[in-house]
Image (tube, helix red, strand yellow):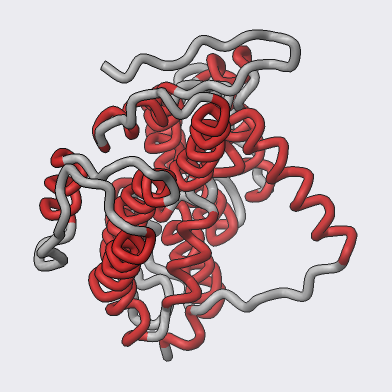
C-alpha cells in the first residue's frame, strides 16, 4: 500500500468546531500552568501507552466482532479492577471509551483531583507517540477490514509495531520526536536570550559561554563583559536564529514535513510553558531591571517550577538556585 494512503486526511472544520477547539486549548493551557512541569511531564510521558492499549483493544474487538478471551489477561494484568470478572463491551468504541475512563480515574486520579486532567488528555493525545499510535491504528483498521489477520497481535507486539510506523512523508516517530526536541531546545535558548538583547546590560561571560556551547561554530562573539551596541546584539540574535534554522529545521524542510514539525512544536506542553514563563519574566524585568539575569540552567529550572497564581493570590517567585 502506498504511503500516501497512510496519511491522515485533513477534515474540513466548521467555525463552531474551531471555537470548541480554541476553548479546549485555553482550558488546557490554564491547567498546564497550575502544575509544576516535572509532575505534569511524568503523566504526559505515560499517557500514550494507555492510549495505545485502548486503541489496540478497539482494533481487536472490531476485527473479531467480539471481545476475545485473549483480551482478558492483558486487561486484568494492566488494569486491575477494570473487568472485574466480566467480559468487556462488545462494541469497540465503547470498550476504548470505558478503558480510558478507568485510566483517567485510576491511573491519573491525582490529575483529576488536582484539576489538570483536561490538560493531560489534551496534550497526551498530541504526544508524538500518541500521534504514531493513532496513525498505526488507522492503518490496522483499514487493513484488517480488507484482510482479516489469522490472529490478532498481542498488545506488546502491536505497541512495538506502532512505534515503528511512519507518520507521513516517510518520517518515523523517532525522527519526528528528535526534531521536536531539538526545536524546543533552540526555542528555549532564544526565549532566554531575547530579553537580554533588548537591554543595556552587557553580555556576561556565562551568556557567551552558553551560546558557544549550545551553538557550536556560531562564535566568535566579541565584547564579552562590555556593553555591546544594539547592532552588535542584533547580529548575535540573527546568528542564533540562523544556527537554529540550519540545525533544527533543515531536515524537515528538505524532506517536506516542516509544517508538521512546527504544528507538533506548537502543541507541545513544554513550548506553551516556556512561552508563558518568558512572558512572566519579561513583566518582572520591566518592573525591576535590577533583577540578576539568570543563567540558562536557572532559567530552565524556573520555567519548570513556574506555577501561575490563581486570581487574587500572590505567588512566590521560583528559586533560581
Quarter of the figure with residue 38 = top left
Q: Position of residue 125 (x, y in %)?
A: 54, 48
Residue at (83, 59) in percent of width and height: 17
* Left or right: residue 263 compared with residue 70: right
Tell me the quadrant of the picture where the N terminus can be found.
bottom left
Res. 173 in view: no
In the displayed structure, 151 sits above or below 306; it is below
Quarter of the figure with residue 158 = bottom left
In the displayed structure, 288 sits above or below 88; it is above
Which sits in the foreground, 252 or 94?
A: 252
In the rendered image, the residue lying farthest to the right is: 16
Which sits in the foreground, 264 or 215?
A: 215
Q: Position of residue 68 (x, y in %)?
A: 49, 45
Q: Position of residue 20 (x, y in %)?
A: 82, 50
Res. 294 in view: yes
In the displayed structure, 199 sits above or below 153; it is above
Tell me the quadrant of the picture where the C terminus can be found.
top left
Residue at (61, 43) in percent of width and height: 122
In the displayed structure, 82 sits above or below 220; it is above
* Left or right: residue 207 compared with residue 121: left
* Left or right: residue 273 compared with residue 245: right
Q: Position of residue 105 (x, y in %)?
A: 59, 20
Which sits in the foreground, 122 or 19?
A: 19
Residue at (62, 13) in percent of width and height: 113
Which sits in the foreground, 235 or 271?
A: 235
Amino acid at each position: 500500500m502506498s504511503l500516501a494512503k497512510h496519511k491522515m486526511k485533513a477534515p474540513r472544520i466548521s467555525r463552531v468546531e474551531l471555537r470548541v477547539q480554541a476553548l479546549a486549548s485555553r482550558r488546557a493551557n490554564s491547567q498546564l500552568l497550575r502544575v509544576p512541569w516535572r509532575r505534569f511531564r511524568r503523566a504526559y510521558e505515560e499517557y500514550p501507552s494507555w492510549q495505545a492499549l485502548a486503541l489496540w483493544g478497539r482494533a481487536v474487538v472490531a476485527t473479531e466482532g467480539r471481545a476475545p478471551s485473549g483480551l482478558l489477561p492483558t486487561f486484568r494484568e494492566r488494569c486491575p479492577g477494570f473487568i472485574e470478572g466480566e467480559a468487556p463491551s462488545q462494541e469497540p468504541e465503547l470498550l476504548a471509551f470505558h478503558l480510558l475512563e478507568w485510566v483517567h480515574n485510576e491511573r491519573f486520579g491525582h490529575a483529576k483531583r488536582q484539576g489538570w486532567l483536561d490538560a493531560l488528555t489534551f496534550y497526551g493525545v498530541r504526544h508524538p507517540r500518541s500521534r504514531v499510535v493513532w496513525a498505526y491504528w488507522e492503518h490496522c483498521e483499514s487493513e484488517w477490514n480488507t484482510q482479516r489477520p489469522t490472529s490478532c497481535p498481542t498488545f506488546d507486539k502491536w505497541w512495538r509495531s506502532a512505534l515503528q510506523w511512519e507518520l507521513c512523508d516517510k518520517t518515523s516517530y523517532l525522527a519526528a520526536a528528535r526534531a521536536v526536541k531539538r526545536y524546543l531546545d533552540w526555542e528555549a535558548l532564544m526565549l532566554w536570550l531575547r530579553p537580554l538583547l533588548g537591554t543595556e546590560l552587557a553580555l556576561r561571560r556565562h551568556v557567551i559561554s552558553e551560546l558557544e556551547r549550545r551553538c557550536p561554530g556560531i562564535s566568535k562573539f566579541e565584547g564579552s563583559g562590555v556593553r555591546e551596541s544594539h547592532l552588535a546584539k542584533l547580529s548575535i540574535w540573527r546568528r542564533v536564529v540562523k544556527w537554529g534554522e540550519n540545525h533544527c529545521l533543515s531536515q524537515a524542510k528538505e524532506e517536506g514535513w516542516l509544517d508538521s514539525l512546527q504544528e507538533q512544536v506548537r502543541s507541545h506542553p513544554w513550548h506553551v510553558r516556556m512561552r508563558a514563563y518568558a512572558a512572566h519574566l519579561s513583566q518582572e524585568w520591566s518592573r525591576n531591571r535590577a533583577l540578576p539575569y539568570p543563567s540558562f540552567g536557572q532559567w530552565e529550572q524556573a520555567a519548570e517550577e513556574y506555577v501561575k497564581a490563581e486570581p487574587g493570590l500572590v505567588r512566590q517567585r521560583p528559586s533560581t538556585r
